[in-house]
Amino acid sequence: QVQLVESGGGLVQPGGSLRLSCAVSGSIISIYTMAWYRQTPGNQRELVADITRSGSPYYVDSVKGRFTISRDNAKKMMYLQMNSLKPEDTAVYYCNAPKYRLPWGQGTQVTVSS
């Protein structure tokens, strides 16, 4: 009955910024590692970044230095601050928790275009 709800996506010009949010709801749970993924049409979902409960982050090379992942355990929220956005960042962004097999949310669309 756990739900993951992504929000914060939108249309932004190259070089712009967006802040994505992921809300965990539906039950009271504790998640060790949470992650952001993204998917474009015709491609598989790919990992963007993840973060442990203590705040240790991991980023794929393509977003290092531009994206910052964070979480608020008390609020059961996770965030992805995206700066210096590029057209290749355009995708539907999803959050989830590796190993927990939670259902995927609807995702939030990020479009980077001039």
Image: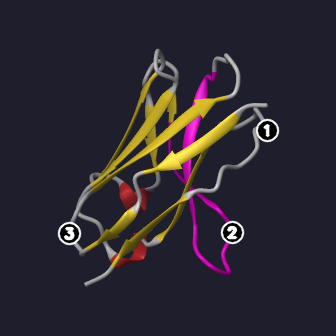
- Distance from label 2 to label 3 (Cα)? 25 Å
Q: Amino acid at mark 1?
A: Arg
Residue under numbered circle 3: 15
Residue at 66 percent of width and 75 percent of height: 43
Residue under numbered circle 2: 44
As drawn, is 35 to the left or to the right of 57?
right
Q: Residues within 10 Å of mark 3 (few under 14, many from 20)?
A: some
| Residue 68 locus on image (x, y percent) | 33, 43
Q: Is residue 6 above or below residue 24?
A: below
Magenta span: 31-50
Residue under numbered circle 1: 101
> Please, which residue is most extreme toward the front here?
26
Position of the C terminus by quadrant? bottom left
Residue at 37 percent of width and 58 percent of height: 63
Position of the N terminus by quadrant? top right
| Residue 80 locus on image (x, y percent) | 39, 45
